[in-house]
Amino acid sequence: MPFYPVTRPIILMMLSLTLFPPTCMSQSTDTSSDWSDAVVRWDNQCGAKGCLLMTDVLRGESGRPPDPKDSREYIGIYVAVDRATRKPSYFAFHVDPNAQQDQGVFVAFTKTTKEGDKWKMNLDGDGATRLPFSSCSKDSCVARVLDGVVAKTDESSGMNLLDKFLNSDTALFLYVKNGHPYRTMVPLASFKKEYQKMLSSELAPVPSQQR
């Protein structure tokens, strides 16, 4: 498999070439939130141990149009929340099973600021973080982060994924397949709403019984 010489500066440059629809750049944050709900829909499954928030997002254009009928062309995001602690037990990101395993998947986050009548997207100061794959199968390659906390290393400034998901506007993902980088932008407004809804309903604390 061809090797793509990925470095953090190159990753940041490629991630900065995001796929924001032009119409979104001049919209209000409320309208943008409605747009996020339509583009990214989260499913919620709860059981005795906790809840699992999950979504599948068709990968970005990246110079090669995706095939919406091919399940390998989607990025799956799974957030497991422990019922006892009400905190994530893991984050998992599923990408194309043919992604270069030595590269893993890179993730970065953005915030939007208003400049005049338009919104400008800015990459998070922590930059891009490489998440190694924990496993690969015929269906997907998976990067799993226990407790949602990425340790600080030479390749990462370290981050709390839940904090990033709740306080950023978009998450950017990039993986490499056959020497070609594929990047995808995922709006996070709908995640914030579903996460708070889950905490206040399925994972709401049980009131102590009065004696």
Image (tube, rainbow, N blue to C red):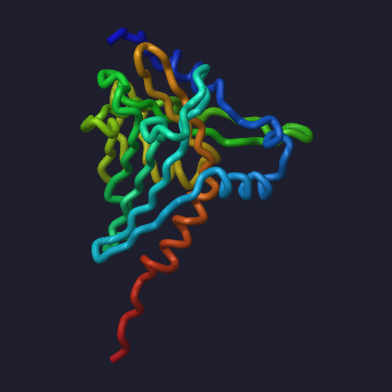
Residue 106 relative to residue 184: left or right: left
The x, y position of residue 59, in whole percent, is 46, 30
Is 43 in front, or is 196? 43
Residue 84 relative to residue 56: left or right: left
Q: Residue furthest bottom?
A: 211
Name the residue rendered at 28%, 57% in the picture: 82
The x, y position of residue 29, in whole percent, is 66, 45
Name the residue rendered at 44%, 34% in the picture: 69
Name the residue rendered at 28%, 30% in the picture: 141
Which quarter of the rendering shows the N terminus? top left
> Is the residue 108 above or below the residue 80 in the image?
above
Which quarter of the rendering shows the C terminus? bottom left
State the image quarter where residue 49 is shown.
bottom left
Residue 118 relative to residue 54: left or right: right
> Is the residue 76 above or below the residue 18 in the image?
below
Name the residue rendered at 45%, 43% in the picture: 165
Q: Residue furthest front?
A: 69
The x, y position of residue 155, in whole percent, is 32, 22
> Is the residue 105 above or below the residue 201 in the image?
above
Is 58 in front, or is 159? 58
